[in-house]
């Protein structure tokens, strides 16, 4: 599925220290009633949990990075799942030697500091996530 999207409001801000990175971004979307958009952020976390999807067995595995990391890049989107805004984000994180790690952002990354931008969008089509049988992932419904 694809559709033309148009930019609406742009929300820029920082997240509270100690908040869960993924949960706090979703909270910002709920606070501003954003159900479709793009997200980017930079900052640092005190630890992180990132996912990797094993395509052959259709199962996620998680990597726990139990140390302070820089958020070099967080990029993602906001759409609806079960009628609620859901943030899907991927991160590239770095350690004290500049080594990069990354993956699908999971809950379990407490914010040390984070500056974010959320670009709200509008579309004639609803971007609603549903289980996709081919991949086993919750993707935007076809049509
Ligand atoms: Zn992902």
Image (tube, grey):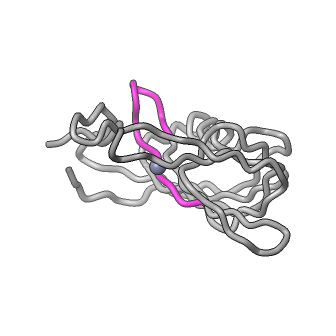
What segment carries the magenta color?
Answer: 74-86
Image height check: is 72 above or below 31? Answer: below
Q: Nearer the viewer, residue 61 or 122?
A: 61
Across and down, in percent, residue 54 comes to: 42, 46
Q: Nearer the viewer, residue 67 or 143?
A: 67
Across and down, in percent, residue 51 comes to: 55, 46
In the displayed structure image, the side of residue 79 where residue 28 appears, left or right: right
Across and down, in percent, residue 78 comes to: 46, 46
Residue at the spot x=85%, y=45% of the render? Answer: 17
Q: Nearer the viewer, residue 77 or 136?
A: 136
Judged by its main secondary structure, the magenta piece is strand
Q: Nearer the viewer, residue 13 or 56?
A: 56
Q: Confirm whether the magenta stretch covers residue 131.
A: no
Which residue is situated farthest in the top direction here? 82
Which residue is situated farthest in the left direction here? 143
Which residue is situated farthest in the front direction here? 56
């Amino acid at each position: 599925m694809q559709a033309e999207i148009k930019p609406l409001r742009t929300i820029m801000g920082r997240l509270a220290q100690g908040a869960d990175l993924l949960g706090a971004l979703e909270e910002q979307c709920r606070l501003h009633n954003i159900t479709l958009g793009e997200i980017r952020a930079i900052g640092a976390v005190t630890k992180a949990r990132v996912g990797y999807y094993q395509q052959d067995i259709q199962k996620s595995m998680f990597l726990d990075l139990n140390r302070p990391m820089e958020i070099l890049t967080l990029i993602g989107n906001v759409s609806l799942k079960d009628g609620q805004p859901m943030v899907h984000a991927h991160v590239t994180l770095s350690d004290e030697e500049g080594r990069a790690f990354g993956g699908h952002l999971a809950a379990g990354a407490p914010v040390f500091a984070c500056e974010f931008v959320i670009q709200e969008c509008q579309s004639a089509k609803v971007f609603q996530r549903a289980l996709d049988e081919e991949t086993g992932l919750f993707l935007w419904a076809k049509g």
